[in-house]
Amino acid sequence: MPQHIARLLLLIVAFGVLAYGGKRFFTAESFYEYGHYRGKSVVEIAAEKPKYKGTAYCASCHSQQAAEWSDGVHNSLDVGKVVKCEVCHGPAGERDPELMYVPATTGPDHPKNWKMIVPADSRKLCTLCHERMTGRPSQQRQIVVADHAGTQQCTVCHNPHSPRLNLVSATALPAGDAAAGKATAAVCAGCHGPEGVSDNLPGPTLAGQHDAYIIDALKAYSTSVRVDPMMSAVAKVSDEDAANLAAYFAGLKCESALTADKQATLPGRNAAAKCTVCHGADGVSTNRSWPNLVGQSKAYLIAALDRYRSGARKNAIMAGIAKGLSEAELENIAAYYAAATCK
């Protein structure tokens, strides 16, 4: 046999021995036990559970959020409803994708080297529990997503750590003098009516309006948060005068004439479903910081919604809702609440 052929065969045999030895030495014992992977990895991966630290671990750094959570509906032991921090923010110990998924048992913990998840799309997260579904417990607040607030994020209106509404009724208002407010209100009669009921006048009805809302509206006009040629000029009043005006108008009578039977016959009731949670089905709000819509004309309501859409009135909640309304929906909502006349 030629010498070069013998050397070539010897080299092939050597490579074969090295390949066989490498396979025996470097291949895991359980490889191909169940398929083309290491069989023992299944057990190891299953054992790598995320490390949940509990709310006490979070409270040490986030005391305000922990206090809101502990006093809110997400921590209701009486109904067996406890939504802990890590349900929404992810476990405080986790496999970190930036570190090539280091196992949780040896990987980083928050806050050392691990950033917790801050959900950007609250609509997607909150509706996992609160979208109306057949068979879901009635104790759990449920919404029809499309009718609730359009494309608005839940966190615009709701405290994310306890889903009560962020806009809380003012409780520390200065005590107003209704008699003094009546005298001051004489200049308002031309636009709002002598008894606060606007009947084909340019301004909205103020009779029966919440005192907190009136004070907030006057401040908004005086600071140019709201812009109106007339109101921006006349709203520059002292805090005492604002409280007196609010007390006077809040004490005037304007009860809604919109009954449940009448509501059922109005074509705009479906479109108005987006508004009833804050403004009431009969135009009477349950929160002193939100306006009653009872007694308002269709033209005024359309103009107000248009101002929210354009930004002339600045309110994060109303801007998002108004921008999501079609022209037909805007007309129907205005017509619905215009039926809530004073009685």
Image (cartoon, helix red, strand yellow):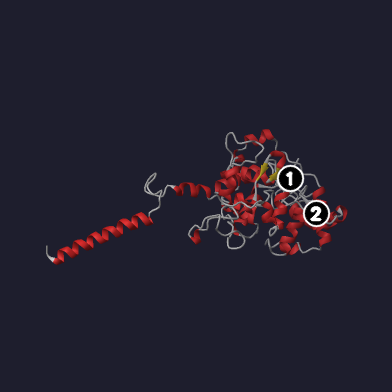
Question: Foreground: 200 or 53?
Answer: 53
Q: What residue type is labelled 2?
A: Ala
**Mark 1 sits on what residue?**
286
Q: Is mark 2 on a helix, strand or loop?
A: helix
Q: In this view, does 231 lie above or below 78?
A: below
Mark yes or no: residue 272 visible. no
Q: What residue type is labelled 1?
A: Thr
The residue lying at 73 percent from left, 57 percent from top is 217
Give how far across and how far down residue 310 sits, in percent: 59, 58
Give how far across and how far down residue 265 sits, in percent: 63, 34
Give how far across and how far down residue 183 sits, in percent: 85, 56
Q: Is residue 55 above or below residue 137?
A: below
Q: In this view, does 111 lie above or below 124?
A: below
**Mark 2 sits on what residue?**
246
Q: Is residue 55 above or below residue 2?
A: above
In the displayed structure image, the side of residue 118 where residue 183 appears, left or right:
right
In the displayed structure image, the side of residue 17 where residue 332 appears, left or right:
right
Question: Foreground: 73 or 324?
Answer: 73
In the displayed structure image, the side of residue 299 where residue 48 appears, left or right:
left
Q: Mark 2 packing: few (<14 Cα in 10 Å), some, or many (20+)?
A: many
Residue projecting furthest to the bottom: 4
Q: Is mark 1 on a helix, strand or loop?
A: loop
